Amino acid sequence: MLCKSIVYSVQKSPKPRQLHHMPKAPLPGEPAKPYTLTEIPGPRSEALLNELSKIQQVGSIQYFGDYQRSVGNYLADIDGNVFLDMFMQLSTLALGYNHRSILGALSCGGNQRVIANRPAIGLFPGLEWPCKIQDTLLQPCVAPKGLPCIFTAMCGACSIEHAIQMAFIKYAERHRRGKDFTEEEKESAPFNKPPGCPELSILSFEGGFHGRTFGALALTHYKYIMKIDIPSLQWPIAPYPQYLYPLDQHEKENKEEDARCLEQVEDLIERYEKNMPVAGILVEAIQCEGGDRHASPDFFLQLQDMCKRRSIPFILDEIQTGGGATGRIWAHEYFELNIPPDIVTFSYKMQASGFYHSPEYMPKQPYRVFNAWMGDPIQILLLEAVLQTIEAEDLLTHVCYVGNYLLCQLNTLQHEFSDIINSVRGRGFIIAFDTKCRDMKQKLMHLLRNKGIQVGDCGTKSIRLRPCLIFGEYHADIFLEILRDCLQELAEC
C-alpha cells in the first residue's frame, strides 16, 4: 500500500538529508554523464528519417531511440548519443528505461499469457481482472478519495471522450427524473437529432489540451495546427488564470486574475443555458501543453463550488499530472477540495488509462459507455510494478524533495540569467520556466540537446522538465551544470 508515501509527501518541510536515501551517483547500469558523438539527429537517424518519410509524416521526429541500450534516466539513440532524458517519452515513463520491475512483470509466464490473449475486457475479462483492478487502481492510497468507481480505456483521449459521455448521460438522466427513454428520443438519436441527441455542451478553458479525438479536440485550445480544417463544436471556452511570477510578489494581481476568470465562467454558463446548457466543466489540474500554467487551490475550490451549486459535473483532467509526477498520486490533492471531483481522468505515468467517478455516474444500462477493448490489461500489469516500486523506494517523498531542490537551483539561475529565463514554477517533477521569446526557447533547446539533455517545450516560450520518478539530485546537478553552460553561451552571444 502507498499510504506511507502519501503521508510523507504531505509534510510541508521535509528534511532532505533525513528522508532522502537515493545515492548521489549514477543508478545501476547508467553512464556517469550524458554524451553526444554526432550532430542531432545523427547520420543513421537521418537515413531512417528519409526512408520513413516516404510512407509517413516525420516532421515531429527528433531522432530514433536505441531502447536496448537505454537505461534508467538515460535515452540512447541509434547514433551512439546518450541523453539525460528529462522529458521521458512525453512524461509517460514512470520509472525510466528498462527498469527491473517493469522487465520482471513482462517476463512472468502468467503475464505473458495475458499479453498473448488480449481480452475484450467489456465482454470477456480474465479471471484476474477484478482483483488486479482492486490491487492497483482502486487501492485506497491510489484512487482519489470519494471516487470508488472506475472506467478503463485505451488512451488519454479515449478517457476524455468517455468521461464527457458519462457527464452528458448524467445530465440527461437528472432532467428525465427517472423516466424511461421516450419513443421520440429513441427514433431521433440515430440521426444526431434532438431530443435523442440533445443540444448540450462542455465548458473548457483557453490553453487546455485534452486530446486529439473529435470531442477531446473540441475541448483543446492550444496550437492551431491541431485543429485547422477540422470541424468542431461551438462549446463555451473560458479564460484560464495567467499568473505573474514570482507568486509571492504578485498575490493581489493573481487573486484578481482568479476572480476575472471565475466571473467569465459564470457568465458563460448563464449565456449557454437557453440553447446549449453546460453539462460539465472540464479542467486540467495543471495546464501542461498550454505552458505549464498553474491555477491556485482557491480557483479550483471556487470552480468546484460553482459546479456544485448548479449541479454541473466537475471533471478534473489528471492525464498528465497523475501517477506521482507532482509528489502526490494526484495533483488535485494539493487543492484540498471540500468534496471529491465528480470525475478524474488519468493516463501517462499511470500506464493504464481511464477515469474515476462517483457511484451516481454509473450508467444504468450496459453499452452506454463502451468500446471494444475497455482498457488494456498489459498496462495494469505495468502499473502494478510501478506502484510496488513507488512504495518500496518511497518515491513520492523523493519526488517532492528532489523537485524542491531542482526548483531552488533554477530560481538561482533565473536571477543570474534574468534576460534569458524567468517564471520558474512547478510541483514535484512537473517543472517549467519561460524564455524571453520563442526564438530563444528554440536556441536553448538546441544547445541542451547537443550537449546531451532532452527536455520538452510547451506553450509559446516555455521549456518543461518531466523526469521520471527515479531522477535524483545527482542527475539534477548534471542538468543544472549543462543548463548553466548553455545560458552562459547565450548570454555571450
Image: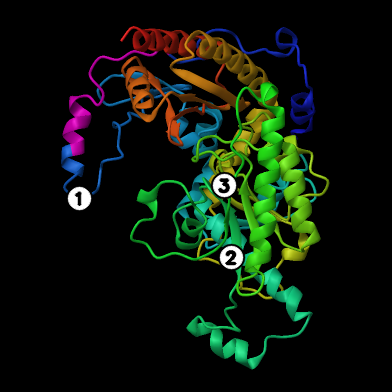
Choose the circle earlier in sequence order: 3 or 1. 1
In reply to whether residue 152 is colored magenta, the answer given is no
Residue 351 figure quarter? top right
Between marks 2 and 3 in the image, the one whose residue lies nearer the viewer: 3
Which mark identifies residue 469?
A: none
Depth check, mark 3 against mark 1: the one in front is 1
Which of 275/260 is in front? 260
The outermost residue toward the right is: 338
Quarter of the rendering containing residue 384? top right
Looking at the image, residue 258 sits to the left or right of residue 380; the answer is right
State whether residue 420 is above or below residue 93: above
The kind of residue on which mark 3 rests is Ala
Q: Is residue 143 visible?
A: no
| Location of residue 428 in the rendering, given as x and y in whole percent from the top left corner | 63, 26
The amino acid type, in three-letter code, at marker 1 is Ile
Q: Residue at x 51, y 45 (%)?
A: 207
Q: CA distance from mark 3 to mark 1?
A: 30 Å
Which residue is pictured at 59% across the width and 46% down the height? 380
Quadrant of the frame with the C terminus: top left
* N-terminal-most mark, 2 or 3: 2
Q: Magenta residues, as a range?
A: 31-49
The tag on residue 122 is 2
Q: Secondary structure at mark 2?
A: loop
Does dot 1 land on a helix, a strand or a loop?
A: loop
